Image (spheres, grey):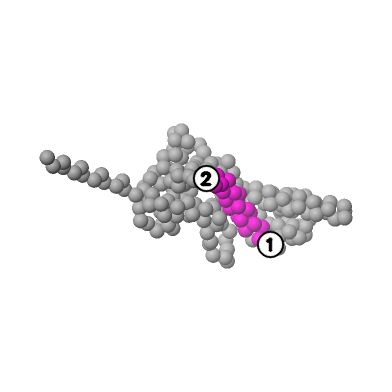
Amino acid sequence: MKKQSLRQRYRQELRRTILESAREAFLLDGYESLSMRALAERIGCSHGSIYLHFKDKDELFDCLVEESFAQLGEALLALKPRGKKIDSVAFLKKAGRAYVEFGLKNPGAYEFAFVLRRPRASHPEKPHPAYEYMRSVVQECIDEKRFRRISVDAASQSVWTAVHGITSLLISRPDFPWADKKTVIAQVVDSAVNGLLSPARPMRPMRKISR
């Protein structure tokens, strides 16, 4: 039993080492340049050991993509307090800022989730938990009539486009003479959300008091 436990632990550690090394190699050299044999040499194991965990390079790459989305999803889910009523608009802005912060703290994971693509990917693009989570918050804003009448997907994707744009730029252009980054991020997120708000209700005219 003990030998089995040690073997299982070794397999888990090797799988984690494969994933971490593959992430670095894909980001550094690109998808086409990496082979399973070269990855095995990088790790210091036989390439047959890698095939025990992943059937090919495509499966390895896709696993890293899914893992990256899962990390982002967990970061967003951790924001919402359980059992407490929140201001949906304020919370959407908070989630937008958290999205950008996640990308800046985890650029490798972010690039795998949203930037890198492997050639000849056969499966269609699908929404991931992080997007579905943001969509659910936008739906709350619409249901509460905080947002004007608009498609939930159009609203969600417009916010996502804004936060993805600033995240990608901050990651890919770190040497650009940015203004205060927190200020820029807040401006982008707030503008994207505020642009969806319902117009203020006009004040009713005061009734004339008859004498």
Q: Nearer the viewer, residue 186 or 164?
A: 186
Query: Magenta segment, which residues?
Result: 59-84
- Name the image quarter holding the N terminus: bottom right
209 left or right of 162 in image: left
209 left or right of 135 in image: left
- List x then y, in percent, for residue 62: 62, 58
Element assignment for label 2: loop
Within-10-Å neighbours for mark 2: few <14, some 14–19, many 20+: few
Residue pointed to by mark 1: 56
Tell me the number on the disc at residue 94: none
Residue 172 in sight: no
Q: Nearer the viewer, residue 37 or 192?
A: 192
Foreground disc of the pair 2, 1: 2
- Name the image quarter holding the C terminus: top left
Element assignment for label 1: loop
- Assess whether residue 30 is covered by the magenta stretch: no
Q: Nearer the viewer, residue 151 or 80?
A: 80
- List x then y, in percent, for residue 36: 70, 57
